[in-house]
Image (cartoon, grey):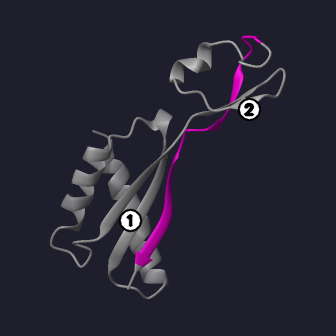
Amino acid sequence: MHELSLMASVMDISREELSRHGASRLLLLRIRYGVLDQVQPDAMHMAFEAMTAGTPHEGAKLELVEEPLGLRCSLCGHSFQPEDRNALYAPCPSCGETAPFVLTGGEGIFLDHLEAE
């Protein structure tokens, strides 16, 4: 369950931001993650609740936004968002070639938005 360590890192960053802006209580935390990161939303919510319980942040809202896979053909330059990860190994829908694709989305975890008081 890598969600616990992911949430611990996000909470560390959140606390630094709160301190930097003179805030003491987290109200909303929005995290964007790529489909390739295999994040389990339920596990993220459980980790968030466990880490905020008994703290001034208890009751804060967690929003998780999954970013779709984005690919660009390295031959024709066609960009697309396939429905299935297996498209990494499929022919380009534009030129039909099976050249490697450039990953343009669907990977990475980001603290997207934070609200505090």
Residue drawn at the location 37% of the way across and 50% of the way down: 6
Q: Secondary structure at mark 2?
A: strand
| Classed neighbour count for the residue bearing mark 1: other residues with Cα under 10 Å, few (<14), some (14–19), many (≥20) | few
- Which residue: 30% across, 50% down? 44
Question: Dividing the image into 4 quarters, which one contains the N terminus?
Answer: top left
Whichever of callouts 2 and 1 sits on the residue coming sooner in the sequence is 1
Q: Which mark is residue 12?
A: 1
Question: What residue is at 38 percent from the left and 40 percent from the top?
Answer: 39
Q: Is residue 15 left or right of residue 83?
A: left
Question: Is 19 situated left or right of 80 in this image?
Answer: left
The answer to if 106 sits in the magenta stretch is yes
Q: What span is in magenta? A: 96-115
Q: How many C-alpha atoms fall within 10 Å of the one at disc 2: few (<14), some, or many (≥20)? A: some
State the residue at coordinates (48%, 82%). Answer: 20
Residue annotated with mark 2:
79
Quarter of the figure that contains the C terminus = bottom left
